[in-house]
Image: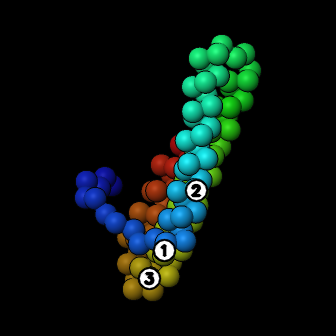
């Protein structure tokens, strides 16, 4: 199932603050990678940093997915909208490809 509709998710100010803080850290990691390339750092150092960035992105993705699933289970399942669970499982599959 493919969705072409842009949807919005409510996030508390604290959730947004935490996500943005983590994204700023990831941004710093990526800037560090750029500098590593610019200054010809060794391949192993660059690859370790790439693994760190990848891990950070997966971690924040899992946090967003966790929040989404909690919302689905809290609202949509109680309303018997089983399709929402299918969408959540689809999101999980896309995140962990």
Mark 3 touches mark 1? (CB < 8 Å): no
**Which residue is tagged 2?**
21
Which comes sooner in the sequence, label 3 or label 1?
1
Q: What percent of the width, then of the height, locates residue 63? A: 58, 61
Disc 3 and disc 2: Cα gap in Å? 28 Å
Task: Answer whether residue 65 is visible to the viewer in this image.
Answer: no
Q: Is residue 25 above or below residue 8?
A: above
Measuring 54% from the left and 59% from the top, which residue is drawn there?
19
Q: Mark on residue 12?
A: 1
Nearer the camera: disc 3 or disc 1: 1
Q: Secondary structure at mark 1?
A: loop
Say few, some or many: other residues with alpha carbon within 10 Å of mark 3 (under 14 / 14 to 19 / 20 or more).
Answer: few
**Which residue is tagged 3?**
75
Answer left or right for 14 relative to 46: left
Answer left or right for 81 relative to 46: left
Which comes sooner in the sequence, label 3 or label 2?
2
Q: Quadrant of the N terminus?
A: bottom left
Q: What percent of the width, then of the height, locates residue 67? A: 53, 68
Q: What percent of the width, then of the height, locates residue 25? A: 61, 47
């Amino acid at each position: 199932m493919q969705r072409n509709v842009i949807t919005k998710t409510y996030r508390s100010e604290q959730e947004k603050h935490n996500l943005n803080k983590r994204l700023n850290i990831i941004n710093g990691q990526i800037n560090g990678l750029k500098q590593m390339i610019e200054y010809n750092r060794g391949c192993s150092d660059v690859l370790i940093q790439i693994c760190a960035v990848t891990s950070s992105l997966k971690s924040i993705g899992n946090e967003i997915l966790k929040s989404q699933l909690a919302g689905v289970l809290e609202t949509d399942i109680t309303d018997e909208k089983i399709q929402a669970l299918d969408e959540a499982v689809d999101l999980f599959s896309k995140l962990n490809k």
